[in-house]
Image (cartoon, rainbow, N blue to C red):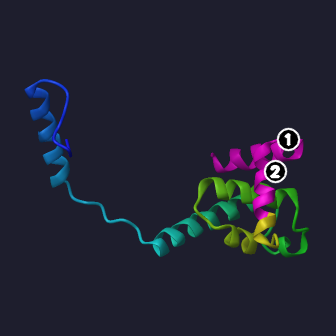
Amino acid sequence: MRRGWYLGHKKFRDRLLDLLEKGMRARPSTPMTSSQRKDHGEGKAAEILETGLTSLGLKREDLRETPKGMKEKAVLAWIIKKNTSASLKWLSEALDMGHISNVSSMVRNVNRDEDYTYKSLKKKVSRILKI
């Protein structure tokens, strides 16, 4: 319709025009700013992190003392990345996983689903989070 052409009968054209007019009159949605989107993603990520830690029997304080490549951390990073817009930097800091390239690599490993330990941890966390 933007270029002035359509295929069909005159009734079809009139119906299209009516639909377009209704769409134009609809209240435009206000998009989220990037900082609002970031805050929302990190808030949701923090909720998932707390629930995930509980489901795995860990505490936030434990994250500093455990190895950076711990499989439980990788699964938590995977599920948070899968369900939120949290950045790799945020995940790296929240889970104490070292450089963001480590986080990316570990999330990719969990995604491959080759390791049985990852499979069982993913099931456990996903069941509790109902994801």
Q: Amino acid at mark 1?
A: Glu
Observer-nearest residue: 8 or 117? 8
Residue at the image point whose x is 73% and y is 60% from the top: 77
Q: Main secondary structure of the magenta part?
A: helix
114 inside magenta stretch = yes
| Vertical order, 77 against 36 (above or below) | above
State the SS at label 1.
loop
Q: Position of residue 58 (x, y in %)?
A: 82, 64
Q: Which residues are magenta?
A: 103-131
Figure quadrant of the N terminus: top left
Dot 1: few (<14), some (14–19), or many (≥20) neighbours within 10 Å? few
* Structural crowding at the residue carrying mark 2, measured as other residues with C-alpha within 10 Å and reported as few (<14), some (14–19) or many (≥20): some
Q: Residue at x 20, y 44 (%)?
A: 3
Q: Position of residue 23 (x, y in %)?
A: 20, 48
Give above or below for 93 relative to 109: below
Q: Is residue 24 left or right of residue 35?
A: left
What's the amino acid at mark 2?
A: Asn
Judging by the rendered image, the residue that carries numbered circle 1 is 114
Rendered view: 69 above or below 96: above
Q: Measured from the top left, where is residue 112 in percent x and y?
A: 79, 44
Q: Nearer the viewer, residue 119 or 100?
A: 100
Marks 1 and 2, the one that precedes in the sequence: 2
Residue at (19, 33) in percent of width and height: 6
Q: Nearer the viewer, residue 110 or 62?
A: 110
Instruction: Determine if the magenta segment contains residue 91.
Output: no
- Label 1–label 2 contact, CB within 8 A: yes
Q: Is residue 113 above or below residue 72?
A: above
Residue 39 visible: yes
Report whether residue 55 is seen.
no
Q: At numbered mark 2, what does the secondary structure look like: helix, strand or loop?
A: helix
The answer for how far apart the CA atoms under marks 1 and 2 are is 8 Å
Please name the residue that numbered disc 2 is placed on. 109
